[in-house]
Amino acid sequence: MNAYTTADYCREKIWTTLGPEWGADQGKKAIVVRALYGLKSSGTAFREHLGKFMSDMSYTPLRKADPDLWMKEQANKAGTDYYSYILCYVDDLLVLHHDPKRVMDRINKHLPLKPDSVGPLTFYLGAKLKKHTFKSGRQAWGLIVLPSTSTKQLRTAENPFPVEYSPDNDVSPLLDPGEANYFMQLIRILQWMCEIGRLDICTETSMLSSYSAMPRE
């Protein structure tokens, strides 16, 4: 099921003429009450719909930090208190919980999920992820960076973004498909670094990411 259509309200007033698939009702006029893709208010309608469900599960958004990050005080099987989290990116959900399947099963009853989309974290927001275990025993998720498939030798630079460099004036040759794919992976890593606090590289990362479709040498 499409995510937006689970929201039963949008600000636009939409109607349609029923087609032959409606049998005896063909030709009748019908008012659309669901949030359809393409409508201006559909995104807001779905976010409010999802937010209400999160509140019903007793999750609270971190309004001052990130309103799409929801938290709830919990206790694990050993009785240790902790906070579980649900990260929402439109209809992509990342659950941090001692029993995440139970949470996802509850979400699935309210917002039907694609069966093959539920499972251990391997891919999120365009980035491939892998769990790493450190010598201390602690575990963390890290990005997987695939090597460039280009046959060219990648060049090195003293500065990843020289002061005098201007991407909009760059007329150097376009990267081949292998190099372009590698470029996009590096951009995604930089974007994640911005997300976790590297505000000092946000401007440069944004400038470079705007040319991801046709990056140049």
Image (cartoon, rainbow, N blue to C red):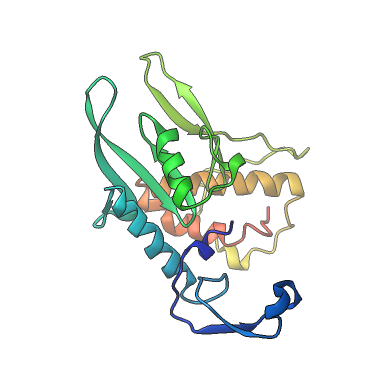
Residue 75, quarter of the rendered image: top left
Residue shown at 74%/38% (left/top)?
Answer: 149
Residue shown at 59%/35% (left/top)?
Answer: 145
Q: Nearer the viewer, residue 202 or 117?
A: 117
Residue shown at 52%/64% (left/top)?
Answer: 4
Q: Which of 24 and 165 is in front in this view?
A: 24
Quarter of the picture containing the N terminus is bottom right
Left or right: residue 68 compared with residue 117: left
Q: Position of residue 186 (x, y in %)?
A: 57, 44
Q: Where is residue 6 in the image (x, y as percent from the top left)?
A: 50, 62
Q: Which of 168 and 183 is in front in this view?
A: 183
Residue shown at 44%/59% (left/top)?
Answer: 203
Report if residue 163 is visible in the image: no
Q: Where is residue 88 in the image (x, y as percent from the top left)?
A: 42, 51
Report if residue 91 is visible in the image: yes
Left or right: residue 131 compared with residue 151: left
Query: Total number of numbered labels?
Result: 0
Residue lying furthest front? 24
Residue 15, quarter of the rendered image: bottom right
Q: Where is residue 81 in the image (x, y as percent from the top left)?
A: 21, 29
Left or right: residue 114 compared with residue 8: right
